[in-house]
Amino acid sequence: MSRLLVASALLVLSIPAFAGSFAGSSAGASSAGSSASSGSSSGDDKVVLQARDDAASFVASEGRIRGARLEAALRHLRERDADAREATDMALAQAILAL
């Protein structure tokens, strides 16, 4: 049981790292009033942000519902981020929801 608590705590602490690694540029772009076409990563961030509904379904169903947008976002994240390659689908889905 204590391992589960430690893992949960680590997950909560790692969510900002995931969010910063794959969506930091979109947050900066929106605060600066930039359009989605202003940066090369904006389109990539869009893939992740569009997966939020699928991520919510995945988390709520304890992994039983896997939407196409979530699958695309998971693939995208793992292609671009070494930490994401090590993370579970559930951890990444929760990180997407935290954006």
Image (cartoon, rainbow, N blue to C red):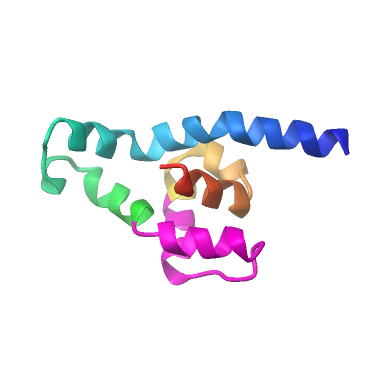
Q: Percent from the top left, x then y, of residue 74?
A: 49, 55
Q: Residue 69, located in which quarter of the rendered image?
A: bottom left
Which quadrant holds the N terminus?
top right
User: Which is more toward the observer, 76 or 4?
Assistant: 4
Which quadrant holds the C terminus?
top left
98 in magenta: no
Q: Percent from the top left, x then y, of residue 5?
A: 78, 35
Q: Percent from the top left, x then y, of residue 51?
A: 40, 59
67 in magenta: yes
Give the magenta part as a residue range. 50-76
Q: Is residue 12 above or below residue 91?
A: above
| Label total for image | 0
Please tell me which residue is depicted at 59% across the width and 28% down the height of the picture: 13
SS majority, magenta: helix
Please tell me which residue is depicted at 59% across the width and 58% down the height of the picture: 59
Q: Residue 28, located in which quarter of the rendered image?
A: top left
Q: Percent from the top left, x then y, of residue 31?
A: 19, 32
Q: Is residue 92 left or right of residue 7?
A: left
Please tell me which residue is depicted at 66% across the width and 31% down the height of the picture: 10
Q: Which residue lies most toward the front here?
A: 60
Q: Is residue 62 left or right of residue 44?
A: right
Please tell me which residue is depicted at 38% across the width and 52% down the height of the picture: 48
Q: Is residue 40 left or right of residue 74?
A: left
User: Which is more toward the observer, 87 or 94?
Assistant: 94
